[in-house]
Image: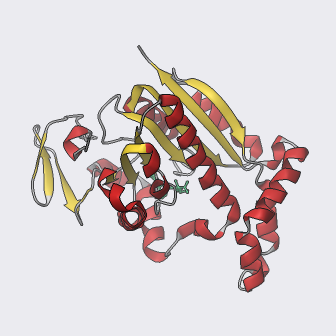
Amino acid sequence: MSFSLTSFLQCPQTKSKNFELFENYLSFEDGTKYSFVDKIPVMLMPSMINQQEGLSFFENFYQTASEPWKYSQRAAECLRHDYVVEKVAQLTEKLGKKAKILDIGCSLGHITARLHPYAELIVAMDISLTAIQKARYHCLQSAHKKANIYHFVVGSATDLPFIDNFFDIVVASDGLHGWHLPQELQQKAAGEIYRVMYRQAYAIFTDYLHPRLHYKVSSILEKFPWQIECIELLYDRLWYQFESLLKAFKQYWWAQKWLASKKIALFLRSIAKNLGNNYSKHITAIVYKNES
Ligand SMILES: C[S@@+](CC[C@H](N)C(=O)[O-])C[C@H]1O[C@@H](n2cnc3c(N)ncnc32)[C@H](O)[C@@H]1O
């Protein structure tokens, strides 16, 4: 089954669902219009464009750096991406079907590009148009024959441009906290995730913050009527300390090789696990919405 934009988009402002597609824009029945840029629907409300500092921050970041955060060269980040992909694989098995997946804040599509074996639809969304253009390139290169299951949308987690009860799995990887939102908007974003999840659906959260602040993530999640299935730590703090130690040497090939080494990252993880919860920068959570 293939999905068109009309199967899942809704106006983030008025919540209207019916729209007509034109060459350069889409127009909802109540008159609200959103443009296509490079064939990508830009579903940002005017108030977001003016008010959300994050929008210009992230867009500038993607325009000036080829790979912000250099995730693909940093082993702890690659292990985190592996973790999310493995969780998606396990959850689709639990669901017993290929999933409709939403990846919010998908960045360059490092995770998104690896999800096609588990999906019948993947919607990749980011607040940055540049990120989405790069993610599209990356995903379509990786997915080959499954390229038609991908859709790319610019939008904000705080006002998701999607209909209620639609997605089987929502990925918010380095999201809630990583989106640089004030507490009330983090909570709004979590509520939006709950809204777009199908009646029986999962969401995966990961966030990078000081261990003494991990409670902030769980306290937001606890506000919604999903079940918190598990909270896990990635025990990666020693790796980030190792990265700081190598900062002065990062132009040398050997330092880059060590930082990209999953073996070293796994070794540091095994030590960190023995040192306790204070040795994890990342906290992760899986939640299950089960509405009748
Ligand atoms: C820290 S990165 C995480 C990227 C990726 N999900 C990962 O796990 O590697 C956060 C991403 O979220 C995007 N972002 C920031 N604010 C957002 C918002 N309000 N809604 C959607 N995406 C947002 C940024 O542009 C960036 O690509």
Can residue 261 be seen by looking at this rendering? yes
Q: Residue at x 62, y 53 (%)?
A: 82
Classify residue 114 as left or right of residue 243: left
Classify residue 126 as left or right of residue 281: left
Residue 4 occupies quadrant: top left
Q: Position of residue 227 (x, y in %)?
A: 57, 22
Q: Position of residue 199 (x, y in %)?
A: 40, 23
Classify residue 153 as left or right of residue 201: left
Residue 267 occupies quadrant: bottom right
Residue 261, placed above or below residue 289: below
Q: Quadrant of the N terminus?
A: top left
Residue 80, placed above or below residue 190: below
Q: Position of residue 173 (x, y in %)?
A: 55, 48
Q: Residue at x 41, y 52 (%)?
A: 52
In depth, the one of 50 and 204 nearer the eye is 204
Specify the farthest residue to the top: 292
Q: Residue at x 27, y 55 (%)?
A: 42
In depth, the one of 124 and 244 nearer the eye is 124
What colour-coding does the image apply? secondary structure
Can residue 10 be seen by looking at this rendering? no
Q: Residue at x 24, y 66 (%)?
A: 38
In depth, the one of 212 and 254 nearer the eye is 254
Q: Quadrant of the C terminus?
A: top left
Numbered label tally: 0
